[in-house]
Image (cartoon, rainbow, N blue to C red):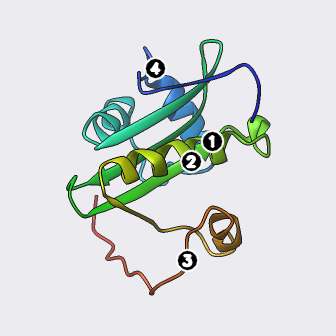
């Protein structure tokens, strides 16, 4: 785990940092606004943020009914901070939170990332599907 990284449930003071993080990863194909990203995080069941000083360097969140299933969404780490254990630490904290509430953590990931998530105990179980909508 990267020393000096602060993991917290407290969101950034300015969600512009999250927009910057999403854009650095090429994740903003929907052209989400700062307001929409803030709403996305605040409406999630569980969100954890990683900061280096005041800079947001990582975030992951769970959408859930709080009873059976929790879908882990958007495990993101700023490119210059990747491969330092930040994503793994956020996922471990997220999994612990789910276990404490007896919620089954599930996730979808891009092809090629399965082996990373398997190291954290995830197993491929089915094919997911998605429907495109006009936004």
- What residue is shown at x 49% (from left), y 54% (from top)? 29
Q: Which residue is mark 4?
A: 12
Instruction: Give the Cα separation between the discs numbered 2 and 3.
Output: 15 Å
* Residue count near mark 4 (Cα–Cα under 10 Å), binned few <14, some 14–19, many ≥20: some
Q: Which residue is mark 2?
A: 92
Q: Residue 61, percent across and down?
A: 42, 45
For residue 128, side relative to residue 39 (left or right): right
Mark with earlier residue (4, 3): 4
Describe residue 127's horizontal placement relative to residue 81 as left or right.
left
**Precedes in sequence: disc 3 or disc 1:** 1
Task: Count neighbours of disc 3 (C-alpha within 10 A) and say few if under 14, some if 14 to 19, many if 20 or more.
Answer: few
- Check disc 3 and report the residue beneath it: 123
Tag 1 and tag 2, C-beta contact below 8 Å = yes
Residue 90 lies, with reference to residue 128, above or below; the image says above
16 is higher (above) or lower (below) than 47:
above
Return the residue at label 1.
89
* Separation (CA) of disc 3 from disc 1: 19 Å
Identify the residue shown where x is 33% and y is 73%.
132
Q: Is residue 29 left or right of residue 45?
A: right
């Amino acid at each position: 785990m990267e020393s000096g990284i602060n993991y917290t449930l407290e969101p950034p003071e300015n969600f512009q940092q999250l927009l910057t993080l999403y854009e650095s990863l090429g994740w903003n194909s929907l052209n989400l606004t700062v307001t929409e990203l803030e709403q996305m995080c605040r409406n999630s069941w569980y969100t954890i943020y990683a900061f280096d000083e005041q800079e947001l360097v990582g975030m992951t969140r769970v959408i859930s009914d709080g009873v059976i299933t929790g879908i882990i969404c958007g495990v993101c780490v700023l490119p210059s901070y990747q491969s330092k254990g930040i994503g793994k630490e956020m996922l471990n904290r997220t999994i612990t939170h789910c276990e404490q509430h007896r919620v089954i953590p599930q996730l979808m990931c891009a092809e090629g990332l399965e082996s990373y998530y398997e190291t954290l105990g995830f197993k491929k179980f089915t094919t997911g599907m998605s429907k495109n909508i006009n936004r």
